[in-house]
Amino acid sequence: MFEKKIQPMEVLNFFKIISRYHRVGHSLEQCMDDYMKVADTPLMAELCKSIKKSLGNGNDFASSLAKHPDVFVPFVVGFVKVGEQSNKIDIFFDRIAEGLEQNLNLKRKIASATLMPKISMTVLFFAFLFAVYYLIPKMGSALGEIKVELPLITLVVLRIGEAVTAFWWLIPLLIFGAIFSLKYYKENNPFGYSLLGLKIPIYKDIVYNSLHYQLCSLFALCLGSIDKSSVALNYTAMAVDNKYMQKVLNVTSQFMQNGDTLAVALEKADERKIVSPEVISMIQTGIETGRLASILESEADTFKFKLKNDMETIGDKISAAVMTPSYIIMLLFFAAIEYPMVKLTQDMSALSRGVGF
C-alpha cells in the first residue's frame, strides 16, 4: 500500500547504502537494520522491515524484493537474482544503482527539456480554442459581409475552425482510442511493444544503446562466474530489462543446446534483427580467441559512452521536435488572420485616395 509513495531516488539510495554495508561483511538482514537507521523516510524503513521479515522466513533477497513490484521493477529483481546465483551480488548492486541513476537522469533531462514546450503547447492550445470558438467565427462573419477576397491560408484556417467546432467530439475519441490501442498492443504483442521505443526518432538511439549496454555488460558479468555460455545467457535474460531481448537470449540458449555456436544461435534467435551485427561479430571473435568476457566488457563500455552522449543531447532533440512545429503553426495562424486585415486596410486606403482624387 505504501509502495506507490516511495520515490525512485529513495530506491537508488537504498541500493547504494546496502551495497556499502554488504561489502564490509554484513549479512543482508543486517543491511536492512543498517539502512533502517538512516532511511530517507519512515515508509522506506517500513519497507526494509518487511524485506527483513521475508529474509528471516527463508526467502532469498530477490523473492523478498519481488513482493513489492511497485517499488522494485523487474530489471532490479532480475539483477538481484542473477547476483545471488552467481555469488557476485555486490557487483550487481552497483549495476542496479547505475541503472536507476541513468533512468533518473534521463527522466530529469526529458522533464527539463519538455518544460518550455509544455508551456508553449498549453498556451497554443488555449489560443487555438479562443481562435476556433470566438476569433475565427467573428473574422469569417466580418470578412463575409465586406466581401474581401480571402487568401488560401485564411480559407484553410476558417475551414479548420468550422470542422473543429462541428466535430469537437472526435478529439477526445481519438485520444481515448490511441490510449486503448496502445494498451491492447502491449497486452497482445509484448515483444513488439518492448521495441516500440526504437521507432521513435528522438528516443530510438537511447533505447538501442541501452539495450546493447545491458546485453554486453550483464553477459560479461555472468560469464565471469558461470563457465557454460548457454547457462550464462539464461541468467542474463533474467536481468535484461526488455521482453524481446529476454526471449532472444532464452531461444539462443536453446539453439546452443542443439549444437549451434553462440554467434550463430544469437543471429538465428534475433528474428527482428535488433542485435548489432558488430556485437555478433565481436562475440564470434571472443569465442575464437578465448576472450569473450573481456571483449563483451569492451563493447559494453562503447555502448555506455554512446548512451551518455545520447542522454546529454536528448533535451535539444525534444525541444527541436516540439518547439519548431509549434512556432510554425503559430506563424501560419497569425498570417492567416493578419493578411486579410492588411489587405483590407490597403484596399480601403486605395479607395479613399481614389475618392479624394
Image (cartoon, rainbow, N blue to C red):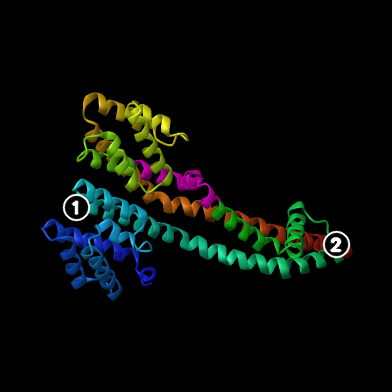
Q: Secondary structure at mark 1?
A: helix
Q: Is residue 191 above or below residue 40?
A: above
* Nearer to me, 187 or 213: 187
Give left or right: position of 24 versus 148: left
Residue 173 at x, y percent in the picture: 66, 61
Residue 27 at x, y percent in the picture: 15, 60
Dot 1 alpha-carbon crowd within 10 angstroms: few under 14, some 14 to 19, many 20 or more: some
Q: Secondary structure at mark 2?
A: helix
Earlier-in-chain disc, 2 versus 1? 1
* Nearer to me, 225 or 315: 225
Q: Is residue 199 magenta?
A: yes
Q: Which mark is residue 13?
A: none
* Residue 179 visible here: yes
**Amino acid type of the residue that numbered disc 2 sits on in the rendered structure:** Leu
Give left or right: position of 132 versus 218: right
Which residue appears farthest toward the top when viewing the image?
A: 288
At horizontal 20% and vertical 71% (from top left) the residue drawn is: 38
**What range is drawn magenta here?**
185-212
* Nearer to me, 90 or 348: 90
Q: Which mark is residue 90?
A: 1
Depth check, mark 2 against mark 1: the one in front is 1
Query: How far separated are the C-alphas under marks 2 and 1?
Result: 86 Å
Q: Quadrant of the C terminus?
A: bottom right
Residue 278 at x, y percent in the picture: 36, 30
Which residue appears farthest toward the left when viewing the image?
A: 24
Q: Which residue is mark 2?
A: 351
Give left or right: position of 23 versus 266: left
Residue 140 at x, y percent in the picture: 79, 64
* Count of number-bearing discs: 2
